[in-house]
Structures are given as C-alpha cells and as structure tokens.
Amino acid sequence: MSSVRDRLANKLRLLGIFANCDVATLKGIVEQSQWLSVPGGRLLIEQGEQAEAVFVLLSGRLAVITGFGTSEERLVTEISAGDSVGELGVIASTRRSASVLALRDSELLRIPGDVL
C-alpha cells in the first residue's frame, strides 16, 4: 500500500514543473511542504504580496482574480484539482500579479519557494 507521501509525489509528477523530477526528489518536496485546508470564500493569495510558495490544488476550486475587491476586478481563470498556482512568481521572485480565491472548500499542498 502506498503512503500519502507517495501518492502526493505521484500527483506532483503530473504537473509540468515537476515532470523531470525523480521520485526521491518529489518525496523530498512533499516532505518539506504543508497541507492546507482553505474554506470557500477565503483568499489564498493576495495580489501584490511577495511570492514565497507554489500551491498544488488537491481538491476544490480556485479563482485567479486581478483587482480583487475593486471596480477593476476581473476573473482571469479558474484552477481545478491537479493544477498548480503561483509558480511563475516564485520562479521570477516577483510579487503576485493576481489574487487567488477559494471558490469552495479546498485542499492544497503549499510548497515553499526555497524547496524548488
């Protein structure tokens, strides 16, 4: 029977940014990551904050929004289970270009940028 860590490592392997990583590396990434439960309606990422982590959505649904809470608010895209969000900001060491809102209760894996 495979462990939770093995299953999460296999999920990561399906994402483009981790496709070339070996299983041992993926297990190490999972071990240094944090499991998050985010209730629907809560902000996960706020536009303008420093990008410090990548998030992998394990279950639920997220919305990527620019100008959140302003008259300029615009839905950019929705994120489905199995997708990641925040990797570009971490790789480029920039501030977040959009906010990310949990549309419903969601489970995520938070991967610190320094682990990548």
Image (cartoon, grey):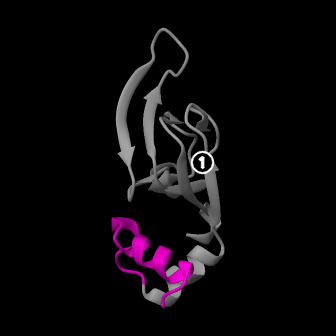
Does the segment drawn in magenta span residue 45? no
Q: Is residue 33 visible?
A: yes
- Residue depicted at x 63% and y 55%: 36
Does the segment drawn in magenta span residue 7? yes
The kind of residue tagged 1 is: Ala
The image quadrant that residue 95 belongs to is: top right
On screen, 91 above or below 76?
Answer: below
On screen, 18 above or below 48?
Answer: below
Q: Which residues are magenta?
A: 1-21
x and y percent of residue 14 in the render?
Answer: 34, 71
Count neighbours of disc 1 (C-alpha within 10 A) and say few if under 14, some if 14 to 19, many if 20 or more.
Answer: many
Q: Is residue 52 visible?
A: no
SS under mark 1: loop
On screen, 82 above or below 22?
Answer: above
- Residue depicted at x 46% and y 26%: 66
28 sits left or right of 18 in the view: right
- Residue depicted at x 38% and y 59%: 82
x and y percent of residue 81 in the render?
Answer: 39, 54
What's the magenta bit mostly, secondary-structure-wise?
helix
63 sits left or right of 102 in the view: left
On screen, 10 above or below 67?
Answer: below
x and y percent of residue 13 in the render?
Answer: 38, 75
Residue placed under numbered mark 1 in the picture: 51
- Residue depicted at x 55% and y 36%: 40
